[in-house]
């Protein structure tokens, strides 16, 4: 998408996402801004190391922004939930070609960028709680009210979420029952440099631990719109795309790589690509030193 569209969406999502993060942290009693211990940051990063599985990675969507790598395990997925649409729906378009419907939400735009009977759009923000006044819906409510109903009222789903910081509060509020509905999750995490602060590490690390309990990271890709930052000897990509696969879909694990993957492409083709730092995939140590 155009840079202006990205900037506009980021402002809109941050308006709600950052506020929710602050409120959540305050409710949990985090008020200090002390630095994190280096060993604790490394432990949190290790939770997000990608692993290889028996499922080949394929690219869904276009070559640059709006395209993601997912495991070739899409058969049987009943629907995709895709918050943070803006003016790009190429990922959802490709899923529709496979017969998979998508439920899309983004209050920063009035309608879906594509018309298709399998694409269902709502001008809503995704967040930690339902609030009609702010056009916000929780992931639990959204899935419960929109997911296709089968005879057993189950069925695997796919989550593709790029909501500019609101992913943290959304995931923190989601129930395990809802998260387990997703076979595959593609999430762009923002502000990862906050791992260097004590309150950021505790909040983000708790979400990483929760995801690690249910899923394995099978792909990680830094967004090249942000440069890597080095904090206390640890290299951190501020914005990263992670693909997660539910653990029950994996029968064997192997070494991940190569990095970058041959199907990876820069989010912004006008800027140099950013390779995943070795500390984020466990190939050769963790620190930049």
Image (cartoon, rainbow, N blue to C red):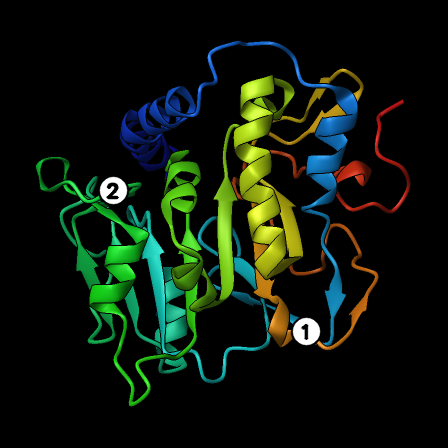
* Left or right: residue 239 compared with residue 165: right
Residue marked by disc 1:
250
Tell me: residue 249, above or below residue 281. Answer: below
Q: Secondary structure at mark 2?
A: loop
Q: Position of residue 33 (x, y in %)?
A: 54, 9
| Residue 248 in sight in this render | yes
Image position, residue 231 (x, y; %): 71, 17
The residues bearing labels 2 and 1 have C-alpha atoms spaced at a distance of 32 Å
Up the image or down, 80 lies above or below 97; here it is above
The mark lying in front, picked from 2 and 1, is 2
Instruction: Place residue 78 in its image quadrant.
Output: bottom left
At horizontal 50% and vertical 44% (from top left) the residue drawn is 188
State the residue position of label 2.
129
Badge 1 local density, few (<14 within 10 Å), some, or many (20+)? some
Where does the image place residue 279, in percent across and percent down from the top left? 80, 37
Q: Residue at x 73, y 48 (%)?
A: 49
Badge 1 element: loop
* Residue 98 image-quadrant placement: bottom left
Q: Earlier in the sequence, mark 2 or mark 1?
A: 2
Q: Position of residue 190 (x, y in %)?
A: 50, 33
Extreme-left residue of the structure: 133
- Please say whether residue 275 is visible from this viewpoint: no
Mark 2 burial class by Cα count in 10 Å: few <14, some 14-19, many 20+ = some
């Amino acid at each position: 998408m155009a840079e202006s569209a990205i900037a506009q969406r980021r402002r809109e999502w941050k308006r709600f996402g950052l506020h929710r993060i602050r409120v959540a942290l305050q409710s949990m009693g985090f008020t200090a801004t002390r630095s994190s211990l280096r060993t604790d940051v490394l432990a949190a990063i290790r939770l997000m190391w990608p692993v290889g599985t028996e499922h080949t990675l394929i690219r869904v969507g276009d070559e640059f922004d709006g395209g993601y790598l997912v495991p070739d395990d899409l058969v049987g997925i009943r629907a995709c939930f895709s918050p943070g649409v803006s003016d790009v729906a190429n990922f959802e378009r490709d899923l529709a070609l496979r017969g998979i419907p998508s439920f899309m939400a983004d209050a920063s735009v009035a309608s879906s960028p594509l018309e298709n009977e399998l694409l269902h759009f709502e001008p809503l923000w995704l967040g930690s709680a339902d609030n009609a006044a702010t056009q916000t819906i929780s992931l639990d409510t959204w899935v419960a009210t929109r997911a296709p109903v089968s005879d057993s009222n189950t069925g695997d789903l796919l989550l593709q979420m790029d909501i500019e910081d609101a992913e943290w509060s959304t995931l923190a509020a989601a129930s395990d029952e809802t998260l387990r509905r997703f076979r595959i999750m593609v999430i762009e995490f923002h502000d990862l440099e906050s791992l260097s602060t004590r309150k950021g590490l505790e909040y983000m690390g708790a979400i990483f631990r929760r995801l690690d309990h249910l899923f394995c990271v099978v792909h990680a890709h830094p967004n090249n719109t942000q440069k890597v930052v080095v904090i206390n000897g640890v290299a951190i990509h501020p914005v990263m795309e992670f693909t997660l696969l539910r653990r029950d879909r994996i029968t064997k694990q192997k070494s991940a790589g190569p990095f970058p993957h041959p199907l990876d492409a820069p989010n912004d083709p006008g800027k140099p690509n950013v390779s995943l730092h070795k500390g984020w995939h466990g190939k050769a140590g963790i620190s930049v030193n």
